[in-house]
Image (cartoon, rainbow, N blue to C red):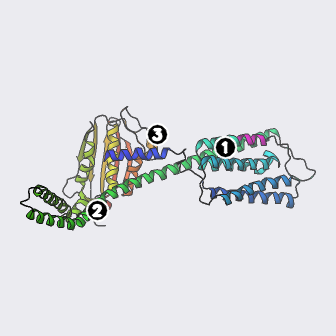
Amino acid sequence: MARFFRGLEKLSEAEIKAQDGHLSSRRLRLQTLVRLRWLAVGGQTVTVMIVAFWLKFPMPLMPCCVLIACLAWINFFLTLRFPPTHRLEPPAAFALLSVDLLQLCGLLLITGGLANPFSILVCVPVIISFASQPIRYSMTLIGLAMICITGLAFSPFPLPWYDGVATSVHSVMQLGVWCSIASTMAFAAFYAYRVSMEASQLADALAATELVLQREKHLSQLDGLAAAAAHELGTPLATISVVAKEMERELKEDDRFREDVALLRSQSERCRDILRRLTTLSSEDEAHMRRLTLSSMMEEVIAPHREFGIALELIERSPRAGEPVLNRNAGIMYGLGNLIENAIDYARKTVTVTVEYTTDTLTIVIEDDGNGYSPEILMRIGEPYVTTRQRDDTAGGLGLGLFIAKTLLERSGAALSFGNRDPETPGARVRVEWPRMLIDSNSTK
């Protein structure tokens, strides 16, 4: 079980680390970008119309209309050329966002540059990129945006305003606007990137958790498939056995076939014995396999981890008489097994598993004699890909596996707490506690 869990963790991490490749899930849907661009076309058109025809400010109306028409034409072409479900590869998304950025900056350049109150909209393509694209493309785009807003600061075109009223922006104010846009862009981009990455990691880690449960479910279904196969094969094997007996009786004196027929009959009888053992599992035996006592479950969880050179001690503080009887739960067993495996990875000599139950709760405490958790890790424990802990050179990692274990146990109703042991006794401590009525199949619910 430990090797399976470790292999699954490495596989899932390897798949999820490939976020900058073409198999990355961070690909922007074309329809989403097209809709945002139509919104930009509509907003720019309404703004230009209000300034030119309602406020009657003098402005280069024809160049503004050409720039807006170019964006609309590109959008219309993309709508006709690609299906709505098409997802953009990172280079294509970068190209389209760059076109959006340059079109907007061109519109701002001929309408006053940084003096235009809509210059803050330069941040929008950058934020979209950081929320949906690999970091190398997003960093290139924010660099292009910085160059563009620097160029807008030197725009030779005046801000559309009332006739006869001169508008001039002091250089210090220009610098302040530039700093404001640049800082807003950087902060919003970083925030969007972090939120998007955490959401993506959480979704991928939960998918890996579902994979663990799905594989266990498939394994548990093999029992039913074996019984069904035994039932279906019983009749043809019985026919083969009868025919083999008849052939053996008829060819008893024929030395050419006597040994072959005897072998055929013995092997058919052997197959029937195997199938008989599969089909004689009574419903009571199956129920017994589905339910197990707390002590049996702990022995089953601990057994695969006893041969790693670390002393593994099980302490039962409550008597076995009256102990909880649990339904076999793959999530609980994998979760506890992974916590024990992590403790063994970081322990020096000993790992202690303490089990205690009362009429209301069931508690399992896992302790090791390693260096314990560092303060910064305790603040983020259980998040996907937290891989740093005070450790020696032989200790394993804390990453997706711990997140999966925590998620599986919490799904069963457990409350987990992570911490360190007393200062005099170094090491880490994990406490897992269930309300007994949720986990004990003998409890009245």
- Picture layout, residue 325 above or below residue 167: below
Q: Secondary structure at mark 1?
A: helix
Numbered circle sitting on residue 376: 3
- Contact check, label 2 and label 3, Cβ < 8 Å: no
Which amino acid type corresponds to the residue marked 1 in the rendered image? Leu
Which amino acid type corresponds to the residue marked 2 in the rendered image? Leu
Decide which of tag 1 and tag 3 comes sooner along the chain: 1
Quadrant into which the C terminus falls: bottom left
How far apart marks 1 and 3 lie (CA) works out to 33 Å
Numbered circle sitting on residue 434: none
How far apart marks 2 and 3 lie (CA) works out to 49 Å
Q: Assign the magenta stretch its main secondary structure.
A: helix
How many numbered marks does the figure carry? 3
Residue 1 as seen in the image, left or right of residue 241: right
Stretch of the chain drawn in magenta:
146-156
Numbered circle sitting on residue 141: 1
Where residue 401 sits in the image (x, y, percent)? 39, 46
